[in-house]
Image (tube, grey):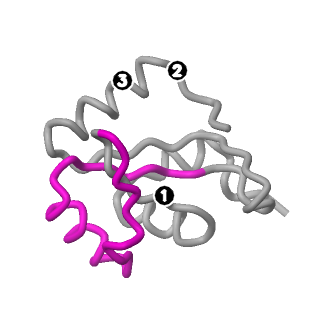
Amino acid sequence: MAFGINKSELQAWKEQVSKGEIAFLTHYWLDPRFENATTVTKVGCVNLERLTSWGKKYGLKKEWIHNRERFPHFDLIGPSQIEILIAEGLESHITRFNMIQKK
């Protein structure tokens, strides 16, 4: 179940993915299989070669791509999600979705 984004944000992500751009969409997410995860970042690109190459930079395997419909993407969850968002200059996603809890 996804929440915390609006339709225009989702539409913008879909447009970027469809154009062959590497696109990021972070949202709140609840899934009983991942009880400690409260967010996911979908990194998509319709160009599978480009998406695979991007993922290799971060140790992501081609077989981890969710190749569904017109929006192939990696799902980033947990510590690697935060590390990759920082590396990509997307700290705003971390702040917006309160990914780092203050002790």
Tell me which numbered mark, 1 or 3, is placed earlier along the sequence: 3
Is residue 53 inside the magenta stretch?
A: yes
Q: Which residues are magenta?
A: 40-69
Which residue is label 2 attached to?
A: 6
Assign the C terminus to one quadrant of the image: bottom right
Assign the N terminus to one quadrant of the image: top right
Q: Secondary structure at mark 1?
A: strand
The residue drawn where x is 14% and y is 64% is 49
Which residue is label 1 attached to?
A: 75
- Please tell me how crowded label 2 is: few (under 14), some (14-19), or many (20+) other residues with Cα within 10 Å: few
Which residue is label 3 attached to?
A: 11
Tell me which numbered mark, 3 or 2, is placed earlier along the sequence: 2
Task: Tell me where residue 10 sits by quadrant.
Answer: top left
Marks 1/2: CA–CA distance: 19 Å
Amino acid on which disc 2 is placed: Asn
Q: Are marks 3 and 2 in contact (CB under 8 Å)?
A: no
Q: Position of residue 5 (x, y in %)?
A: 55, 27
The residue drawn where x is 38% and y is 75% is 60
State how many labels appear. Answer: 3
Q: Position of residue 77 (x, y in %)?
A: 58, 62
Marks 1/3: CA–CA distance: 18 Å
- Please tell me how crowded label 1 is: few (under 14), some (14-19), or many (20+) other residues with Cα within 10 Å: some
